[in-house]
Image (spheres, rainbow, N blue to C red):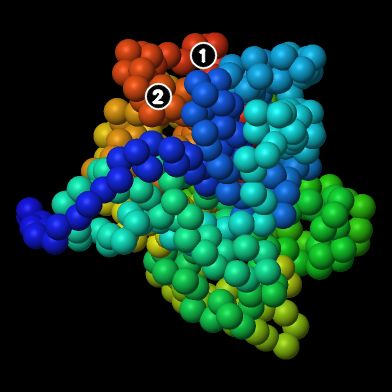
Amino acid sequence: MTLLDLTPRVVDTDRVSTLPVAIIGAGPIGLAAAANLAERGIDFVVFEAGDEIAASVRAWGHTRLFSPWKHLVDPASRRLLEEGGWELPDPERAPTGAELVEEYIVPLAETDAIASRIRTGVEVIGVTREGMDRTRTRARAATPFALRVRTADGAVEDVTARAVIDASGTYRTPNSLSSSGLELLGMADIADAVTPALPDVLGRDRALFAGRRTTVVGAGHSAANTLLGLAELARQVPRTGVTWLIRNAQAVRVSSSPDDELADRARLGSRVDRAVADGRITVLDEFEIIRGRRVADGIELVGYRRGEVVAHGTDVVVNATGFRPDLDMLREIRLELDDIVEAPKRLAPLIDPNVHSCGTVEPHGFRELTHPEQGFFIVGMKSYGRAPTFLLATGYEQVRSVTAWLAGDTTSASKVELVLPATGVCSTNVSDGGGCCS
């Protein structure tokens, strides 16, 4: 359908060119975009919803990544850091999420080229064109973007930008516990007993799980990491129960197959297999959750199992069912998304989790990330929608290509490359089904 817009509109093109590029999210991909823009002399501003940069990475900072340092640093960011004397940590050692933040992301955010352009505690709650909803067409591409932001004190304002790079990730928008994808019936009644993926079971969150029954829901590597922590806690603390609830007959994504492209990932699967065989983890398979409810001695998850309605009692639930992109904030932006995985339509076939793993996704750039809304890009984990095959190196190449396009360098933007070792360069799994980095 062609939208007709007969309203005259005067656009100040000089003003548009003076506006900064808005980056949503100050994680590794958002700051890589900042470094690439800084290298090309393009002004930008970074909005981070958390009180500190890389808030999502900090949430799972106790988790060790699968890949070593040599695969975790963006090239433009490295060049910027090395100008100030920064040195890459041991290239062959895999850091934890916290080490990634403190030894790389924080120093990058503190560089002169980036520090003054970061606004923490500022959540982007909507993106549109200035004075135009998604139905208006005339002079749309030449009209500044308007981002509605909410600050930590609750104040709401609109800020303008020449382009928008959405690197907000998906960690803050988990999938539902319900097998239907809708919010779990009764969720409001049990919300205080449900935790996000990758809690720090043996550290910060130990008291929540010690001596209690915990059910981990999800069939991916974030679930596996949590299960192993709980199994160790059960060894240390009596009456600590661990149940692994999955929707299918088996968790094929937590595999100990010798063909696994990442040795550390395969070892993770082997350790879970042993814990199950030893009775430290109880598997509750083929369970499709439909409702949660309070009972006298905790909570119950009610669902279908092998054709019957059954109830499973527990004290704590860990939601490790994966993540999905927050698209509500983009309702006034013209997007072209795949119907199934909610990734950019040209990208979706390259990241189909039924075909690809982290190490088999082809390099891609601005062309695959382009939407009908010119100058708007979703990058990083959010660009993969519900597909769990993202890796940091891919995200770095995404933003390199996008920023080259914004600079008018179509030759560089079109030349996308990603050099991977035979085993791939997945970093960490914080999404159901083996997502490699969030």
Indicate the quadrant where residue 206 lies. bottom right
Q: Which residue is mark 2?
A: 407
Q: Image height check: is 296 above or below 359?
A: below
Q: Position of residue 377 (x, y in %)?
A: 38, 39
Residue 172 - label: none
For residue 197, side relative to residue 213 (left or right):
left
Q: Position of residue 297 (x, y in %)?
A: 75, 83
Residue type at numbered disc 2: Ala
Indicate the quadrant where residue 194 lies. bottom right
- How dense is the environment of label 2, judged by Cα within 10 Å: few (below 14), some, or many (20 and up)? some
Q: Quadrant of the C terminus?
A: top right
Q: Image height check: is 225 above or below 215?
A: above
Q: Which residue is mark 1?
A: 420
Indicate the quadrant where residue 314 lies. bottom right
Residue 392, can we see it?
no
For residue 264, side relative to residue 251 (left or right):
right
Discs 2/1, front: 2
Contact check, label 2 and label 1, Cβ < 8 Å: no
Q: What residue appears at the point 85 percent right and 50 percent down from the top-left corner?
A: 202
Give 240 or 24, whichever is nearer the viewer. 24
Residue 243, can we see it?
yes
Give 109 or 277, whichever is nearer the viewer. 109
First reached walking from the N terminus: tag 2 or tag 1: 2
Q: What residue appears at the point 92 percent right and 52 percent down from the top-left corner?
A: 236
